[in-house]
Image (spheres, rainbow, N blue to C red):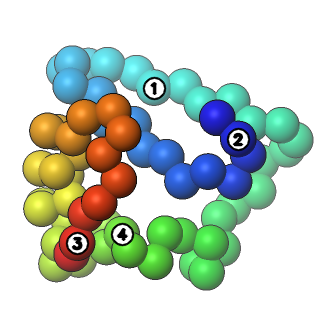
Amino acid sequence: MAAGTWHAVLSLDTGGIIFEVKHGGYQPVAADDYAHWAPAEGEPGTTELMAWYAQAQVGDSTFAV
């Protein structure tokens, strides 16, 4: 996957662990660096987005909040 590509991972296995490795030291994500199309945690649309993730297939790229 190319650097700068929006991506998401959802574990469908209870107790699953996802480990992502990035180059460089830890840098907190700035507010303007979050996906403009994704609701913030706990905001309206979060439940629908998680439901979409649970049924999305490889190559799917559309979700409307």
Disc 2 versus disc 1: nearer the observer: 2
| Rendered residue at 49%/46% (across/down) | 7
Where in the figure is residue 8, as x and y percent of width and height? 42, 44
Closer to the chain start, of discs 3 and 1, is: 1
| Residue farthest along the front direction in this orientation | 59
Residue 38's disc number: 4
Say which amino acid is labelled 4.
Ala
- Viewer-proximal residue among 26 and 2: 2
Q: Nearer the viewer, mark 3 or mark 1?
A: 3
Mark closest to the chain's N terminus, 4 or 2:
2
Question: Label 3's element?
Answer: loop
> Would you name the residue on which mark 3 appears?
64
First reached walking from the N terminus: tag 4 or tag 1? 1
In terms of image quadrants, where is residue 64?
Answer: bottom left
First in sequence: mark 2 vs mark 3: 2
Q: Nearer the viewer, mark 4 or mark 3?
A: 3
The residue mark sitting in front, 4 or 1, is 4
Which residue is tagged 1? 18
For label 1, the crowd category at 10 Å Cα-Cα, with few meaning under 14, some 14 to 19 and many 20 or more, is few
Mark 4–mark 3 distance (CA, rounded to whole Å)? 9 Å
Q: Gap between marks 3 and 1, in whole Å?
A: 25 Å
Foreground: disc 4 or disc 2: 2
The kind of residue on which mark 2 rests is Ala
Which residue position holds label 2? 2
Image quadrant for the N terminus? top right
Residue 28 placement (x, y as % from top left): 69, 61
Mark 2–mark 1 Cα distance, whole angstroms, equals 19 Å
Residue 31 position (above or below residue 17): below
How packed mark 4 is, by other alpha carbons closer than 10 Å (few <14, some 14-19, many 20 or more), is some
Disc marking residue 34: none
Disc 2 or 1, which lies upstream in sequence? 2
Q: Is residue 20 visible?
A: yes
